[in-house]
Image (cartoon, grey):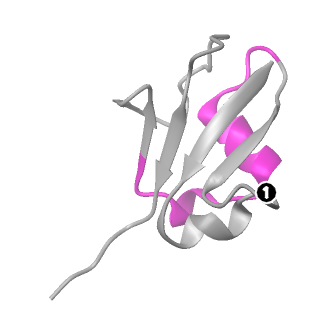
Amino acid sequence: MKVKVELYGTLRRFSQENKKGLWVGDIPTGSTINDLLDIIGISKQEVSAVAINNELCDYNTEIEEDDDMVITLVTPMSGG
């Protein structure tokens, strides 16, 4: 199934060419967020929050097929 992943912070380095901050690709049906991270090449330590259609979820959440779905990955933030 095809998924669209928005990448923020330092995760933007995993963007596809000509798609800054975005990764679009096919993943096997029944994949979890953990599986998706492995496919893209992102370690869990780099991700502070994951959302599917703006709903927070955990790494074991199974990704359901949905043409309008957007998965968002955010890195930890620091401030002063």
The quarter in which the N terminus is drawn is: top right
Assess disc 1: are there few (<14), some (14-19) or many (≥20) residues with their C-alpha within 10 Å of its C-alpha.
few
The residue identified by callout 1 is 16
User: Relative to 31, is 60 on the left or the right?
Assistant: left
Residue 48, horizontal then vertical, whole percent: 41, 57
Q: Furthest-bottom residue in view?
A: 80
User: Relative to 73, is 40 on the left or the right?
Assistant: right
Is residue 35 inside the magenta stretch? yes
Q: Residue at x 68, y 70 (%)?
A: 13
Residue 72, horizontal then vertical, whole percent: 49, 42
Residue 59, horizontal then vertical, whole percent: 53, 37
Q: Residue at x 66, y 34 (%)?
A: 4
Residue 71, horizontal then vertical, whole percent: 54, 35
The quarter in which the C terminus is drawn is: bottom left
Position of residue 12 relative to residue 50, above or below, is below
Position of residue 13 relative to residue 26, above or below, is below
Inspect the image, locate mark 1, and give the three-letter code of the amino acid beneath it.
Answer: Gln
Q: Looking at the image, which is closer to me, 44 or 68?
A: 68
Q: Furthest-front residue in view?
A: 18
Q: Quadrant of residue 35?
A: top right
Q: Quadrant of residue 76?
A: bottom left
Q: Furthest-left residue in view?
A: 80
Q: Which residues are magenta?
A: 29-49
Q: Looking at the image, which is closer to me, 46 or 21?
A: 21
Is residue 25 inside the magenta stretch? no
